[in-house]
Image (tube, rainbow, N blue to C red):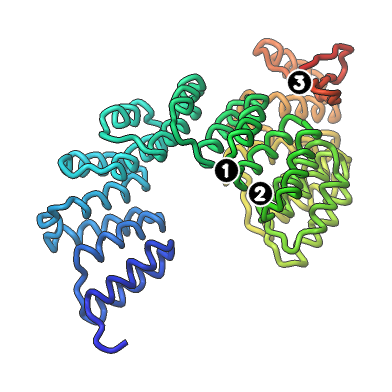
Amino acid sequence: MPGKNVVSWTAMVGGFSWNSYYEEAILLALEMRRVGVKLNDETCISLAYACAGIGYPRLGMQLHALMITNSFEYHDSSGRLLNSLVYMYSRYGLMEYARSIFEKNKRNWTTQSCNAIISGYIQIGKLDKAEYIFKIMPIHDKISVTSMIRGYFDVGQVAKAHELFNNMTDKDDIAWTVMISGCVQNELFLEAMSLFSEMWMEGVLPIQSTYSTLLGAAGAAAHLDQGKQLHCLLIKTQMNMDLILENSLISMYGKCGQVGDAYQMFSSMACHDLVSWNSMIMSFSFHGLAYEALSLFNNMTKEKIKPNSVTFLGILSACSHTGLMKEGWLFYRAMKEDYGIQPNVEHYICVAIWGALLGVCGVNEGNAIVAGRNFQRLLELDSTNAAAHIAHCNMLAAAGQYGEERLLRKEMRSNGMRKVPGCSWISSGERTHLFLSGDGAQFSR
């Protein structure tokens, strides 16, 4: 295009930004400056949204500094530039900056800027401040209401979330999905399914995230019948099956004990991502199919998919539960040495990996020193991990250190530390019967 001016450059930057091509928008703005075309306030507004989307706070701060040095803020009579900064800082979770600009631009508040502040506060767990803005904002729209519903669910205030939802006059698929997700988050599975049925009766069609949320709940509660019903609905309504839904089905069937169905789903997929492989490996691992898990891991590496901490957690767990101690140790070493994955990258992953490793080492006297060192590392992270204590007791007994084993078990009793017993369940009609390991009792729910 000959004769490009600031208007044409800005139109391109805005086009990229509003269509979520954030990196392209920023690179184009840099090229714009390189060829000597100055940014204007409209360019900066588009760039603020691009910086928010790309998620680099320092980049956003540099843009803000550029606005100040060019005095753009002082000529922002409409408040659009400041509102874009409110949105950007809120997305970063830098609420002191966002609130300062928000207050300075009070006469130009919009529903969008209020929503940005509310979402930002909820993101960092400041529900009280989000609630204050919600109360004083001039108009509530679907975004502000659903944001507050999410916030109430995050802190377990289910009644307030229901109250807001019930007062909504026009509930769309997003609002229904937020409610269903919130109920699942608070382990209110029956309420979630009831809302799903009500959603259908109101003529609102579920979206993909509605199904993936409910499939996750069905798996967590081992409600196979509900999971199958959801799968049938997906087929009947010809819902576009994306990777997220397919992975949710693998996980649901695996957690409900239907490993064959999980593998059938996995095999029928046109392509697999890391989550697909991990879901199937974990399904095999949960049910003691270690060799199948190891075989799948080998296929995964042949496909040039790089494993992560979750992958190795599944492999270590499979080896631990089936007595493949040598293989477990080799995979543990490979995790660190070949793939550069450190067990403490994420706290909960680290604890789970060390716990699994203790299970591998605990029955082998030769690995007593290694297990002891791992146990001390785990204690630094979670001193109340009952499963790790029991595994360590088994290791001490295997090494003939019965005195230390008795002391450790005594310490566990004095601290009220008990391992959650293994369990199995059977669904019959609308009731689920739960059986605990080593106990004749049966519970129904």
Q: Find disc 3 in the rendering and name its residue.
A: 404
Q: Is residue 102 positioned above or below 189 on the image? A: below
Residue drawn at (40%, 56%) of the image = 53
Label 2 Cα crowd, 10 Å radius (few <14 / some 14-19 / many 20+): many
Label 1 Cα crowd, 10 Å radius (few <14 / some 14-19 / many 20+): few
Kindly state the secondary structure of the residue where label 3 is placed: helix
Q: Amino acid at mark 1?
A: Glu
In front of the other: label 2 or label 3?
A: 2
Q: Amino acid at mark 2?
A: Ser
Kindly state the secondary structure of the residue where label 2 is placed: helix
Q: Are marks 2 and 1 in contact (CB under 8 Å)?
A: yes
Q: Earlier in the sequence, mark 2 or mark 3?
A: 2
Q: Where is residue 91 shown, x and y percent of the image?
A: 37, 47
Kindly state the secondary structure of the residue where label 1 is placed: loop
Residue drawn at (40%, 40%) of the image = 143
Instruction: Measure the C-alpha gap from mark 2 to mark 1.
Output: 9 Å
Q: Is residue 185 positioned above or below 81 on the image? A: above
Q: Find disc 2 in the rendering and name its residue.
A: 309
Judging depth in this view, the residue of 130 and 63 nearest the camera is: 130
Q: Where is residue 42 shown, x and y percent of the image?
A: 23, 64
**Horizontally, is 38 left or right of 241 in the view?**
left
Q: Earlier in the sequence, mark 1 or mark 3?
A: 1
Q: Find disc 1 in the rendering and name its residue.
A: 346
Quarter containing the N terminus: bottom left
Q: Which mark is residue 373?
A: none
